[in-house]
Amino acid sequence: MIFFAVTLSVITYIDRVAISVVSPMMKRDLGLTNDQWGWCLGAFGLAYALFEMPGGYMGDRLGPRRVLLRIVLWWSCFTTATGFVWNQAALMTTQFMFGAGEAGCFPNLTRAFHSWLPKRERVRAQGIMWLSARWGGAFTPLLATWVVALVGWRHAFPIFGALGFVWAVAFYSWFRDDPAQNPKMNKAELELIRQQAGVGVAHGNVPWKRLLSSRAVWMLCWQYFFLSYGWYFYITWLPTYLQEGLGLKMAKSAVLGGLPLFLGGLGNLAGVFLGGRLAKATGSVPRSRRYVAYAGFLGASSFLMLSTRIHDPVLVVVAIAMASFCNDMVMPGAWGTAMDVGGVYCGTLSGAMNMWGNLAGALAPVIVGYLLKWGHGNWDLTFYVSAAIYLMGIVCWAFLDSNERLEVA
């Protein structure tokens, strides 16, 4: 289960980050300005947000096996189609459809974790999955630069899209919504899952009234909004910033451009490690997650502000990468809380949380484009705004009661 989650996470971020790597070439070839490019990037985030909660709900209702098959095949088709765009409208359409297809991926993996893994292993699994996602994105600049140098950006996207088709066939052949139906399971594994893992069957009776009126749900969603706003810069505008803002050549920007996501992956491990240590020290898992979230949001804000005070390009990227590290310290606790609060409805709840986060993802690239336009190319304003928004996440965790449950015993 972890293997499939890890490989899909890597493919997800290869497909998602590749467009930002080749953005200077695509903007030039398609004749797009910064604000027009921002709308193209925002189209993905908007669709991803709109379809995220329905995707998570479908996983709760139909089971993640069928839903993940549809998700991966859909987004792979539109990753491929990105190589055939000819103007802004065509690119916005493919990005919107790509986002609509990918929506629900991580909520459905979360739903599968709930069914397949004992409770004590779920946060660790989330940390491994998100580390893999970030590292997939971290090495994409090097991979994409190499592929583009060989075949050009138009032919690169069909190559990346093919990865998803291979994964979908292998996953659908092996995975079952109910672990007991997988012929590879032995008796000891089945007994462990029967005693400790969540219910494997689908549930359609989501308690919508309880979900929509829950303060824990809303705080979980808003903290993810504030977390995602700053993070989206690393997978959208960062390559452009490195080349146009810092004046780096494409080869050097490809190397440095992967550092924020690489350290973000380590931030996930740090979040799991610190959360575990603090849980033992305080005797409270919710309190430990809150403390880690405080440190993550404050650290991300501080390092972004520091990046505006440094003039050496390498040190600037290191500061931004440390902001990404702190950002991702929050991730395992946030997704673990979604599993705990949501229970058998964790697909729907994690979909709602990720939907809210990707609303920020839809807004952030567009806002950055206009900030650059209004600021006449001054990038500092972008970091000031992100740093301020990060601090608002601390307020959400102060009011988040992760002991609340949507399931009624």
Image (spheres, grey):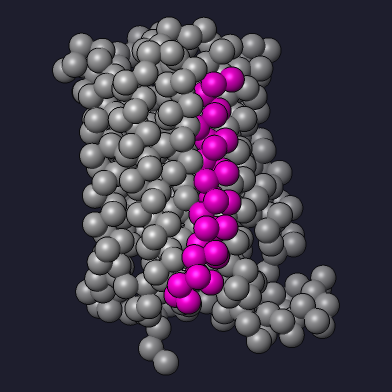
Q: Quarter holding the N terminus?
A: bottom right
Q: Nearer the viewer, residue 113 or 27?
A: 113
The dominant secondary structure in magenta is: helix
Q: Quadrant of residue 235?
A: top left
Q: Which residues are magenta?
A: 255-284
Residue farthest along the bottom direction in this orientation = 409
Which residue is rendered at x = 47% and y = 50% of the image?
A: 329
Q: Quadrant of residue 44?
A: top left
Which residue is rendered at x = 41% and y = 37% of the image?
A: 323
Q: Magenta span has 272?
A: yes
Q: Position of residue 282 (x, y in %)?
A: 45, 72
Which residue is rendered at x = 57% and y = 79% of the image?
A: 198
Q: Position of residue 272 (x, y in %)?
A: 55, 58
Q: Nearer the viewer, residue 379 or 211?
A: 379
State left or right for residue 188 relative to residue 324: right
Q: Position of residue 42 (x, y in %)?
A: 32, 34
State left or right for residue 92 relative to residue 278: left
Q: Position of residue 85 (x, y in %)?
A: 45, 21
Q: Nearer the viewer, residue 13 or 55?
A: 13
Q: Magenta span has 282?
A: yes
State left or right for residue 267 relative to residue 399: right
Relative vertical location of residue 239 with respect to residue 216 in this rendering, above or below:
above
Residue farthest along the front direction in this orientation = 281
Q: Is residue 380 visible?
A: yes
Q: Quarter holding the C terminus?
A: bottom left
Which residue is rendered at x = 52% and y = 24% of the image?
A: 257
